[in-house]
Image: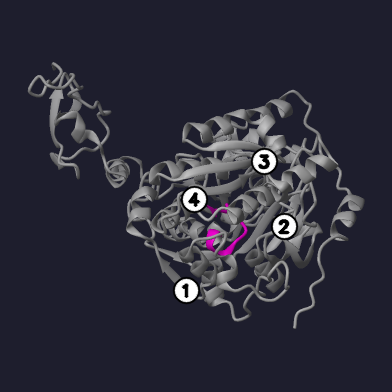
Amino acid sequence: MESLNVENKYPPIPTSLKLREAQPIQRRVLWPCGVGVTEGDVYGTKYFQIKAKPSQLKLSFSYRARANAALNSRSSSVEIPRQWYNLVADLTIKPPPSLHPKTFQPIKPEDLSLLFCDELIKQEASVDQFIDIPEEVLDVYSLWRPTPLIRGWKNCLIHPHEYYYKYEGGSPAGSHKPNSAVPQAWYNKMANVKNVVTETGAGQWGSALSFACSLFGLNCEVWQVRASFDQKPYRKMMMQTWGAKVHPSPSDLTEAGRAILQMDPSSPGSLGIAISEAVEVAAKNADTKYCLGSVLNHVLLHQTVIGEECIKQMEDFGETPDVIIGCTGGGSNFAGLAFPFIREKLKGKINPLITAVEPTACPSLTKGVYAYDYGDTAGMTPLMKMHTLGHDFIPDPIHSGGLRYHGMAPLISHVYELGFMEAISIPQIECFQGAIQFARSEGLIPAPEPTHAIAATIREALRCKETGESKVILMAMCGHGHFDLSSYDKYLQGSLVDLSFSEEKIKASLAKIPRPVLS
């Protein structure tokens, strides 16, 4: 067929979108933008003929997902959740309040207004069980949600039974992070905020927020941990492609950064330092708000779309998980999958073993203390009751496995203290061994972070093989590792090393945490 030229005013555009014969298509489709599409058949090849001006080819976010839903959905009965789930509502023992960093008194909503827009402050303190997801956010979610629940190949884990993984790597940023970045950007846009600032470690969160800001016309500025800024340049390029400004942290642009550089000009940085820099900028500029990619309640809330989808998908498979495994750094990915299942566990419907997996190089749950601590190095954020290694703890820069934050999300820490979950730590060589095994069987190259969940899943599968138990294992696969191949190269070249746990280093860091006396 020849190209279609509309009224000779516009350049030629293609007249067909070729689809594989096996793919289902409808007889007649009316796209939301009004573009007419008609089925045809040329030499046995299905095609769609498009009758439209080029200006009409601006498709809505929701169309793009709906057009592909029939082709790509692993579970056609599952829809994108229309509400986020708030675990706080179902806990009889509520988590301790966050404290003001100066007065050590419970934080008030107005104390957070310098950093966050009003709607996110409401969500942070909410005790409602469910919070509606705005339609505009659902439209963007539909670019990649619902995400697939995949039944794994048994030979990957040398396991005679079933394991599944919920894969979040199909988002534009390649991870679960846009689940929170999109609503945070949208709520700030609705509040007439012009600029947002944030921190990022490996770059997953910075990429996600940059993407979200590009959709809603916000300016985005990112402080990236220096070690990752140098080791992973493609994450920086992703952020810049979506319009963000990216600075290595510590930087000379902030008082917090300059103070660190004065003490250590070659500092590799940490998430705590990067948070201090971003928070400082937000606090000093009235037209700027701060966005955080993990730890806080509202971030974990947004991620629960993962678990809500997964519950229905497991039902479609006719399975109930016996073991749920996810990696933990700040905790957003783990909470996103686990919290809806914890709700079902509290109802007595299921009783899975829920395991958080962290790196031995930064083991806040398994080696930290449960205490009030700052979320950043400079002590500018509220004090949160969490499992912490100390707010000035800096992981070794040769740690390749991600998950570098000094503290665990307060809500996850609280759930851990209540006994609803367990935690283990795994060294990075074992994690990358599992990642290679997974990639060569499943075809997906995992980000360094979920390699911890993979390694733990392999451990559990081998344990089942030894004991003869039959268990259904559900794993959080939170992103792909296409921009983390330098870490894989280190492993494949034999230069990756396991990092010994430094008791002295953490003791020194813990000695500096505040000791608030609550009235």
Residue 494 screen position, x and y as percent: 78, 26
* Whether label 1 touches label 4, CB < 8 Å: no
Q: Nearer the viewer, mark 2 or mark 1?
A: 2
Mark 2 and mark 3: span between their CA atoms?
Answer: 25 Å
Q: Classify mark 2: helix, strand or loop.
A: loop
Q: In the visual, does 243 lie left or right of 390? A: left
Q: What's the mark number on residue 407?
A: 2
Q: Amino acid at mark 3?
A: Leu
Percent x, y of residue 81:
39, 60
How many numbered dots are placed on residues in this image? 4
**Is residue 182 rendered magenta in the image?**
no
Among all residues in the image, which is located at the extreme bottom?
A: 519
* Residue bearing mark 1: 129
Q: CA distance from mark 1 to mark 4?
A: 21 Å
Q: Is residue 11 above or below residue 439?
A: above
Q: Tag 3 or tag 1, which sits nearer the N-term?
A: 1
